[in-house]
Image (cartoon, grey):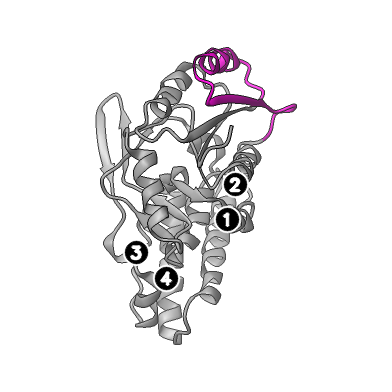
């Protein structure tokens, strides 16, 4: 069954929330999709929940890994699966949701502009205490024009949850080119997406939401622990992002210095690693 959009759920032990997340996709206003549940050798009832849901809706199917993959490798597999299967694809964690118009609004945004590789929207983070809406900073848009004029923001402010936005299939090369450079999955979304932002490859939709459930413990699981590892991650992040100057318009040394400052600040804010109390 062919569809314009494939939604891939890379999931490991997500039985408690998986059905709710699958239902959020099933209830979308946009119906021309397929959903693939990529089961990473779960040891809870994830597979059982997925099988029951697939029996109810033929647009949903399951792929089970033969061996357990790291989170980084499983997400990479999900990206490649999505890119090979349809014109557009997106990822969805087993505990996240979205507004009913999420797929339609993001597909429309990509249809409207062939130059964009990613369509994204505000992130609504939620937990037991309520909701909070996260928007990108206005100064990240039209980045290349601003850069050519010597204007570079101090911070590249956008939600890292844009990794769950809608990608054009040919975006896979840009996603995978820098996917493993950090060496662990913490911070990799922001790191990889920075290229989409500075190269003006993002179509932004303000009136749909991606609903991100807080409290997954990713930072505790995957974040660097000691000073040396934190410094190493900050440097890899900073220098890797700075190399993007080669894909930007020509600029003088002062503009490049501002860009380096932005990359350093972004590495601190996105990894949340403070080497000292203010640094």
Contact between marks 1 and 2 (CB within 8 A): the answer is yes
Sequence-wise, which precedes: disc 4 or disc 2? 2
- Gap between marks 1 and 3, in whole Å? 23 Å
Identify the residue under disc 3. 140
Q: Is residue 247 in view?
A: yes
Mark 1 or mark 2: whose residue is earlier in sequence? 2
Q: Circle 3 sits in a helix, a strand or a loop, which is it?
A: helix
Which residue: 56% across, 71% down?
A: 243
Classed neighbour count for the residue bearing mark 1: other residues with Cα under 10 Å, few (<14), some (14–19), many (≥20): few
- Place residue 28 in its image quadrant: top left
Query: Where is the N terminus found, in terms of image quarters?
Result: top right
Where does label 1 land, which residue?
Answer: 170
Which is in the foreground here, disc 3 or disc 2? 2
Element assignment for label 4: helix
Residue 91 covered by magenta stretch:
no
Q: Nearer the viewer, mark 3 or mark 4?
A: 3
Along the viewing direction, whichever of 187 and 158 lies nearer the viewer: 158
CA distance for labels 3 and 4: 15 Å
Residue 215 in the image: state x and y as whole percent. 41, 30
Numbered disc in front, either 1 or 3: 1
Residue position marked by numbered label 2 in the rendering: 83
Magenta segment boundaries in residue numbering: 41-69
The Cα atoms of the two marked residues, 1 and 2, are separated by 7 Å
For the point 40% across and 74% down, which residue is it?
Answer: 144
Residue 43 in percent (x, y) is at 63, 16
Dot 2: element: helix
Indicate whether 57 appears above or below 35. above
């Amino acid at each position: 069954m062919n569809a314009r959009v494939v939604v891939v759920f890379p999931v490991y032990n997500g039985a408690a929330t998986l059905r709710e997340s699958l239902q959020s996709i099933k209830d979308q206003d946009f119906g021309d999709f397929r959903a693939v549940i990529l089961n990473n050798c779960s040891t809870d009832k994830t597979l059982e929940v997925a099988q029951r849901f697939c029996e109810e809706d033929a647009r949903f199917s399951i792929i089970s890994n033969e061996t357990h993959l790291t989170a980084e490798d499983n997400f990479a597999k999900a990206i490649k699966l999505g890119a090979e299967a349809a014109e557009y694809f997106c990822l969805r964690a087993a505990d996240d949701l979205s507004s009913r118009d999420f797929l339609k609004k993001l597909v429309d945004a990509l249809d409207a502009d062939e130059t964009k590789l990613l369509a994204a929207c505000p992130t609504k983070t939620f937990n037991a205490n309520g909701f909070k809406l996260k928007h990108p900073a206005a100064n990240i848009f039209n980045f290349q024009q601003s850069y050519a004029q010597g204007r570079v923001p101090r911070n590249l402010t956008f939600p890292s949850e844009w990794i769950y936005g809608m990608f054009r299939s040919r975006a896979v090369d840009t996603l995978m080119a820098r996917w493993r450079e950090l060496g662990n999955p913490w911070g990799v979304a922001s790191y990889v997406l920075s290229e989409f932002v500075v190269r003006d490859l993002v179509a932004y939709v303000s009136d749909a939401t991606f609903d991100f459930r807080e409290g997954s413990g990713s930072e505790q699981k995957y974040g660097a622990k000691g000073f040396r590892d934190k410094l190493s991650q900050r440097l890899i992040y900073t220098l890797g992002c700075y190399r993007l100057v080669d894909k930007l318009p020509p600029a003088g040394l002062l503009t490049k210095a501002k860009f380096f400052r932005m990359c350093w600040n972004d590495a601190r804010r996105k990894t949340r690693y403070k080497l000292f109390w203010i640094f």
